[in-house]
Image (tube, helix red, strand yellow):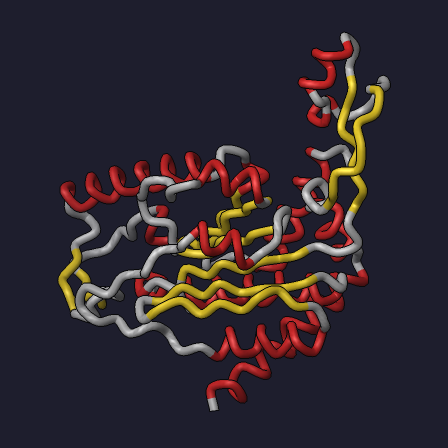
Amino acid sequence: MRLAASQPVLRQLEWRVRHAADAAISGDYRTSFRGRGREFDQVVRYEWGDDVRDIDWNVTARLGEPYRKKFVEERELTVALVVDDAPSLAFGSGARTKREVVLEIAGLFALLAAANRDRVGLWHARPEGTHVLRAERGRAQIVRRASELLATPPPDAAPGASLPGIDWVRLSHVFPRHAVVVWLGDFPPMEPPSHWRAMRRRFEIVGVRVDDPWERALPETGLLSVVDPVDGELVPFDPRSRATRRRHGEWGAARERAFDELFPSKLQRLVISTEDDPLDALVRFFRARMRAMGAL
């Protein structure tokens, strides 16, 4: 039943991806990640106009003139969807919860990858454990995986429920070097994971965070009764209280600092509101990456 219920949503996403592909977004998607989808070939003499980031400094120092690494573009990308399915994603002050938007974005990435004949893998972290699917190609297979992900029920919001955490060392053995890792979730204030620098060298990692409007600015209203998405309890909430607004501001600032530390470049992070159109946000993100890479 859940899988059947996800089919209309998936068909709508497929239609939107096909429409976007006609508008060349699929090319935007591929080009924006081209820098990591390549393999080392040989060292050649540096020439004017070559990318200075490819200079091999060891060879340059040894030979006394600049040399750079030459790469061969891979025929396909590997896209690894890392979904942090925390109970806190169940929150939504409007028509949609953050979890609904997270899963929609994951589905869009999967369908764009399928349209470009790329491989897609999944790392789905939930309080009860982690579900891992190795990267595979093929539209039918990827569409089935996207459908199953969209049909997954929210995690149990039991008291004290928390994510098991992402085992980045294990993940690095599951997905190949230079894979595009799309990490989607809530991203509360936290320290960088262990081995984070090594993982950023190994993969092209993009952070996708979904915000609710209330997380950006508390509403101007009186006392409310809200459901805590972590323990499921109904709790009183006064957004006009000075103490509440101070704590909210401190939490928001800490969250932004932590997110920026994880993803220092704007080209590595995407923040979407539950009120945004996810596909439009992805289009802007891809094209911003292309402009920065000199592709436009």
From where the camera sits, is residue 247 visible? yes
- For this rendering, which residue is in front, 157 or 251? 157
- Which residue lies at the image location 42% right of the left edge and 56% below the top edge? 185
- For this rendering, which residue is in front, 39 or 49? 39
Q: Residue 108: image x %, image y %? A: 61, 64
Q: Residue 239: image x %, image y %? A: 21, 51
Q: Is residue 193 left or right of residue 24?
A: left
Q: Is residue 166 above or below residue 290?
A: below
Q: Is residue 157 above or below residue 198?
A: below
Quarter location, residue 204: top right
Locate the C terminus and report the quarter of the image it occupies: top right
- Which residue lies at the image location 46% right of the left edge and 54% below the top edge? 273
Q: Residue 163: image x %, image y %? A: 32, 61
Considering every residue shown, the one lying at the far front of the view is 62
Quarter location, residue 144: bottom right
Q: Residue 105: image x %, image y %? A: 55, 62
